[in-house]
Amino acid sequence: LGLTLLWLTPLALSNVGVQACVRCPGGRRIARSPPVCSDDAQHQSHAVPVRHRVRDQAAERHAALEQGGASPNFGEIAQEALMVPDDNRYSVTPANNSTEMVGHTLLAQADAIYITCMKKCSTMPLPRIWASKVIMVNGRGSDSCLQPESLMKQHPDEIPDPSLHAIAVTLSHLLAVAHAKAQGHAKIAMIEEDMQVADDLTWSRGDVAQALTFVGSNSWQVLRLTVQSFVYTSQGQTHTCPARCVCKEIPGVLIDHSAGRTLCEVDANCHELHSTSMYMLSNGGKGTFDAVLNSVGMIDTLLINSLPQAVLGPPLFEEPAFHAAAKGDVGTMWRLYQERCFRKASNV
């Protein structure tokens, strides 16, 4: 969806406050950092001053929550937009140096890991290495709190009906970023609940160590661990790569090219790279969170691509739904993209 929706983003939470969409087990609240729950009922509600507002109705609901009497249609669903999972959910331990372990370890370098969910918000098993870092972003709770359908009604000529889901997803990602900014985080990860590992190949220890060093640095803003390239979707195409989509090798990181992978950097505005199913954001002195909250468009096309990004490919994880929809094979799409758009450091 290539819609430029100026009214959609920046996301408005100025009337609601991020904490109006947060609920912890047993009524506890999410503390400042790390993202664990606190028993302090006198928590501070961190409002995020941004342009578009979730207006009167949401503000009234927030006031009702603060007074302890939520409206019947809002209730705990909105409070549960952001949820901290129980400790017993952290049970997954993948094989050493496997792609799954590497992916989990890279994501664990984030201060908070936000997982968007609909079906497994309360049941999804989580890697042990992510303990105390995960916040589940409940899609139904986010929708109830941020009201994407009301945006559709306010702008019927600008938004076709099929894009309601994309709007809802975009708002849930922006809610997570706004919450991360309010919590003072430096790095976050965003993941969809249904992601599965793409292969069972083994990585060299050197590549794992160098990748961890890169993720821990402030040299990047967006790191994508899965991507769907629509630059080329047919073996028969022979066009040269658009300059905006050239992926320049980041030298000195993946020396051994474990599992055939490369790490490269793409400038802003290559809108042919889709998917926000698994990515990281680094605020690192570059104002990345503000840039996301002040960008326009849908999250997985215009918005995420408004920033320069590091891309790790082939994708570490993939979406089963992508195959089910017959949209293509992410591995094949990556190879076509790499053949035409990847540039080794020595050739840049």
Image: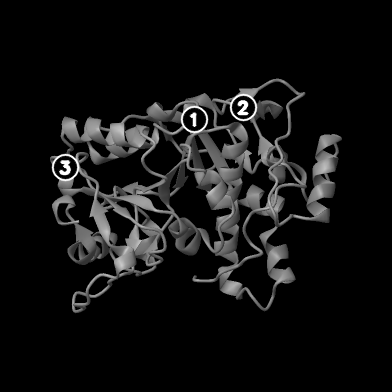
Residue type, mark 1 in image: Lys
Residue 258 - label = 3
Disc 1, SS: loop
Closer to us: 104 or 174: 174
Q: Earlier in the sequence, mark 1 or mark 2?
A: 2
Labels in figure, total: 3
Which residue shows up at 86% across the image and 35% down it? 67
The relative height of residue 28 versus residue 285 in the rendered view (above or below) is above
How far apart, in angstroms, are the residues tagged by discs 1 and 2?
Answer: 12 Å
Colour setup of the view: one colour
Tell me which residue sits at (39%, 27%) in the image. 128
Q: Is residue 11 left or right of residue 215?
A: right
Of label 2 and label 3, which has the lower sequence position? 2
Amino acid type at image mark 3: Ser
Q: Residue 133 — which label?
A: 1
Q: Residue at x 22, y 37 (%)?
A: 98
Q: Where is residue 149, by image quadrant?
A: bottom right
Where residue 5 sits, quadrant-wise, is bottom right
Q: In this rendering, would 168 be left or right of 103?
A: right
Q: Amino acid at mark 2?
A: Arg
Q: Residue 83 location in percent, x, y?
A: 60, 36
x, y percentage for residue 26?
68, 27
Residue 328 visible within the image? yes
**Which one is in front, 63 or 294?**
294
| Outermost residue, top side | 39
* SS for callout 3: helix
319 left or right, relative to 99:
right
Q: Is residue 65 above or below residue 298?
A: above
Give the CA separation, mark 3 to mark 1: 27 Å
Please name the residue that numbered disc 2 is placed on: 32
Q: Residue at x 60, y 58 (%)?
A: 168
